[in-house]
Structures are given as structure tokens and as C-alpha cells.
Image (spheres, rainbow, N blue to C red):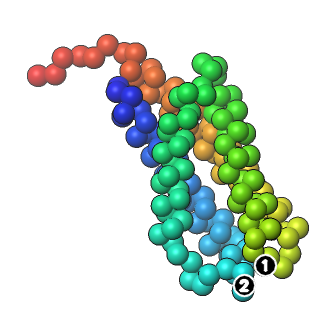
Amino acid sequence: MSSTTRAVLLALTYLVLTFPIAAVWHLGLFPQLMAGPAFRSPPLYAMGMLSTVLQATVVAYLYPRLHRGGLPVREGLRFALIMGTFIASYGVLAEAGKFAIADVGSWVLMEGAFFAVQWIVIGIAVGLVHEWTGRRAAQPQTARM
């Protein structure tokens, strides 16, 4: 398996999991978090989608470079801790500081929980996909007729 194919699969893993997690959390379970005078109504979904595609590209680039060769789930969770902390520092703390959020404590708790759930799932999945694609790359290629 080529490194390009591997990167595409890592990025797709991020995208395929992030969109439904975010939609269920923000639009289904806790829509009140994104409501009120501090937020645009309706949101500019294209901006969020572009942001997520850029994040997927960064994940696909960084994971193989930060991977230390350990167990896939452990490596994925280690990566999740690094990236989740980095992204959540903006999504939880900076946004609470920039927007007129009525209940900052609830925002920090709920958005913090969102990023924890998102990155635990993403980390495990990316670790497993990286391991799987590495095994596929190591297998001898059979001739095709």
C-alpha cells in the first residue's frame, strides 16, 4: 500500500467519524450549546466542513510522524491526547473567551466532553487504521492477471 493511499485512509477515518460525532452532539443531543445571540443562525456549515477537511489532512500527515511503533490503540490514544488537547484548547477555552456565552461553565464542561469523546474515538480508529495499512503494505503483492 502506498504512503499516499495510507494518508488518504487516515484522513477518511477522521472525516467519517468526526462528522457524525459532531452532528449528533451539536445538532441532536445538545443543540442549545450552539444557540443564542453569540452564534450565527444558521451556521455556515461549509466553513466547519472546510475546517474538518484541513484537520483530517493534518491528522493524516502527523500521525505517521508521531507514531512510535507501540500497540495501535495505545499509540492512537497518545496521539488523541496530543491533538485533542491542542484542538480543544481553542474549541473550548478560546471560543468561551471570544463569544458571549451565557453559561461558560456549562460550555467548558459540554464542549470539553465533546472533544474528549471525539478524540478518544478518532485516536483509537486512526491507530487501528495505521496498523492495518502498515500490515497491508508489508504483505507481498500478488501478480494480477
Residue 117 visible in this rendered orientation of the protein? no
Q: Which residue is mark 1?
A: 100
- State if disc 2 and disc 1 touch (CB < 8 Å): yes
Which quadrant of the structure image shows residue 71?
Answer: top right
Q: Which of pointers 1 and 2 lies earlier in the amino acid sequence? A: 2
Quarter occupied by the N terminus: top left
Q: Position of residue 103 (x, y in %)?
A: 86, 75
Q: Which one is in front, 136 or 11?
A: 11
Image x and y of residue 143, in percent? 18, 17
Q: Is residue 107 above or below residue 39?
A: above
Q: Secondary structure at mark 1?
A: loop
Q: Which residue lies at the image location 68% right of the left edge and 28% below the top edge? A: 74
Identify residue type, mark 1.
Ala
Q: Amino acid at mark 2?
A: Gly
- Residue 25 image point, x, y percent: 66, 65
Question: Of discs 1 and 2, which sits in the foreground?
Answer: 1
How far separated are the C-alphas under marks 1 and 2? 9 Å
Q: Which residue is mark 2?
A: 36
Q: Is residue 52 left or right of residue 27?
A: left
Q: Considering the numbered disc 2 on the image, is that residue within a helix, a strand or a loop?
A: loop
> Closest to the observer: 119 or 104?
104
Identify which residue, 69 or 29, lies in the foreground. Answer: 69
Q: Residue at x 75, y 71 (%)?
A: 98
In this image, 124 relative to 95: left or right?
left
Quarter of the rendering containing residue 29:
bottom right
Residue at figure coordinates x 79%, y 60% from the top left: 93
